[in-house]
Amino acid sequence: MVKYRHSVRAALAAGALFVSVAATTPALAQADEQALIDHSVGTLHDLRHDKEFGNARSLMNRARAVLIAPRIFKAGFFFGGEGGQAVLLVRGPHGWSDPAFYQVASASFGLQIGAQESEMIMFIMSEKALTALMADKFKIGANAGIAVATLGSTVEGATTGNVGADIVVWASASGAYAGISLDGSVIEPMRQGDANYYGRPVTSSDIVLRHTVRAHGAGGLVREMNSL
């Protein structure tokens, strides 16, 4: 009987611990999404002060949307795979939207200069590219109607190499040029991330197009976008 009572008490204690952990999980998850937003602000600061890609900032004034990935990992860093998490913001009549959460995954990122980690910004320049990105899964290179260009390592490349492109990619590793090949990469919404951050299930379209939810913690990122 004593052994049984100890077992019951242990089970109840374990159950209470599980409930406690479960109760804090949404808050912890929201902290993860907030960290991604805060790191995205840092990536925008890097873009602003990158002399080599000074003209790339003009893309922001013409972009329909922007996808920011503060940390893109090569194999061995991202649990044996390659990719990272990102936020998507869309330009509207009154400025930039709050962020929706995305993930970027690839069998092999073509990072140059031997980089194992880089930060990346994708400038979505056309409506058809934004429509493709808003789908459940968007695979770069699979849609022949969408042209993707990578900014060159010179100012000339930043202004001429992306003429007519639907998506233009900027990448930097430790402040140095980190040209990146994204062919075959898959970009898809993180629905759980959106639900964690906004407190209920929402779609990317709800956030960036219909503006049905708002987040106070994203104000710094939106202000930074509007200031570029």
Image (tube, helix red, strand yellow):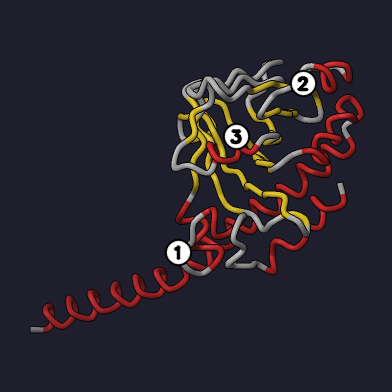
Dividing the picture into quarters, in which one does residue 44 lie? top right
- Say which amino acid is labelled 2: Val
Query: Residue placed at 66% from the left, 29% from the top?
Result: 167
Query: Residue placed at 47% from the left, 68% from the top?
Result: 200
Q: Are marks 1 and 3 in contact (CB under 8 Å)?
A: no
Tell me the SS state at disc 3: helix
In space, the residues marked 1 and 3 are separated at their CA atoms by: 25 Å
Q: Which mark is residue 24?
A: none
Query: Residue placed at 49% from the left, 29% from the top?
Result: 139
Residue 57 is left or right of residue 162, and the answer is: right
- For label 2, the residue is 163
- Say which amino acid is labelled 1: Pro
Q: Which mark is residue 201?
A: 1
The quadrant of the image that shows the N terminus is bottom left
- Say which amino acid is labelled 3: Ala
In space, the residues marked 2 and 3 are separated at their CA atoms by: 15 Å
- For label 3, the residue is 129
Residue 219 picture location, percent across and down: 75, 63
Residue 43 picture location, percent across and down: 76, 42
